[in-house]
Image: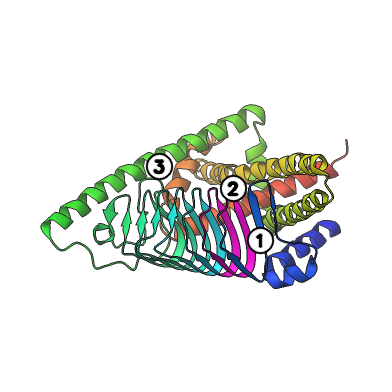
Amino acid sequence: MRRLLVLACAAALLAACSPEDLSSLVPTVRSGSVGKDVFLFEDEVVSNTPVEGDLFAWGTTVAINAPVAGSVYVYGREVTLNAPVGGSVTVVGREVELTNAVHLGQGLLFGGLLLQMDKGARVDGGVTAAGYQVLLDGTIGQSVRGAMLRLRIDGTVGGVPGSRLPPSGSLAFGAKVPLLVGRYLGNAGPTSGADRRAAAQIDSNQLRDRALAFAREFITLFVFGLLTVAFRPTLLYVMADRVRSSPWSSLGFGVFVIVVGYFGSALLAVVLGFLAYWLLTFGLDVLALTLVGVGGGLLALGLILLTLFGAYGTKLVLAAWVGRAILRRVSARVADSRIWPLVLGGILYLLVAQIPYVGLVVALAATLFGLGAAWLVWRDLRAAPA
């Protein structure tokens, strides 16, 4: 337990470090290239040379002024993208700007305070953003989704002008995701008859997309529930009983699992990358690739399992708990069934999850309680005599 707490604290310190702090911790990291991929680690990163592969940039300020054939991965305080990118862009920064010279062949993933997409910029895929303010004045090919406090769309999304998008903070713009959390700072809405008819058509399409998304989510959740019941018939209900008997312990250990699982994995990934880069500098390419392949594969497998359980398993624990609690008031025989509590609880959870803000809080609570209950049950199994 102490070692896990130390690991969690180290991961939290890593997440709180700024780029210059990390540079002081690992002074041996230098810019370079591996094959067609380019790695830039500087205080002020300026990329003026075309890149045939992927570009990885880390610095206080980052400016990309030359085309990139692959994808771009950037972390910096101030980031300016001023050239076409053939793949996707993943960027974390305080202020990020996409100028009118930008054309992304795929999507954009953003995390930070401010995202500014100038008029003339184009993203062929979708935009997924998590931050304070997102200003989209360019052209987006598919959808806009994410969690943001302020959102302004003066460009187009999926061929629909921003003037015809509904001014509601509870809708997603595009057919791929049914919910957008945040405040939409667009115009006042359609005024002409044609605009009103277009908005009505958009609303009907969104209702249909919401219904299809609800059906897909329920089927996916139900299939995971059936698989769990088939292989471990009582596991979900054991976890649900643990949440009921120790709610605060479940919540606390849920936060602990999130911190250790994701921040600890990020720390291990950074260490793994540094070791591989160090081996490459000595010409040990085979050993470096083996380390990245085996270590990265095991780390990715652990993250996938943790994410799957966090996305579906924890919701099944909540569904089993709520469904059985409700059915006990109706019929004890039905409540003892392994299927009907999951069906009722799953439907109720997905309905509540569609409510803006409330659904986000419920989903977060279900994830934390479910992860904490799983940790407590696993700990009890380890402590039980063989």
> Magenta residues, as a range?
51-78
Examine the image and state in which quarter residue 364 appears. Answer: bottom right
Which residue is label 2 attached to? 53
Q: Which residue occupies the foreground of this view, 385 or 135?
A: 135
Q: Are marks 1 and 2 in contact (CB under 8 Å)?
A: no
In the structure shown, which secondary structural element does the residue marked by tag 1 occupy? strand
Q: Along the horizontal axis of the image, is 83 left or right of 293?
A: left
> Does 64 appear in magenta?
yes
Kind of residue indicated by mark 2: Gly
In the structure shown, which secondary structural element does the residue marked by tag 2 occupy? loop
Which residue is label 1 attached to? 40
Viewer can see residue 232:
yes
How many circles with numbers are drawn on the protein?
3
Q: Are marks 3 and 2 in contact (CB under 8 Å)?
A: no
Q: Which residue occupies the foreground of this view, 31 or 203?
A: 31
176 relative to 181, above or below: above
Q: From mark 3 to mark 1, how far is it between C-alphas?
A: 40 Å
- Crowd tier of the residue under label 1, counting other residues whose Cα lies within 10 Å: few below 14, some 14–19, many 20 or above: many
Q: Are marks 3 and 1 in contact (CB under 8 Å)?
A: no
The image position of residue 227, as x and y in percent, is 59, 30
> Does 123 appear in magenta?
no
The image position of residue 32, as x and y in percent, is 70, 56
State which tag comes first along the sequence, 3 or 2: 2
State which tag comes first along the sequence, 1 or 2: 1
Which residue is label 3 attached to? 213
Label disc, if present, on residue 360 of the rendered structure: none
In the structure shown, which secondary structural element does the residue marked by tag 3 occupy? helix
Kind of residue indicated by mark 1: Leu
State which tag comes first along the sequence, 3 or 1: 1
- Judged from this view, the residue extending furthest toward the top is 230
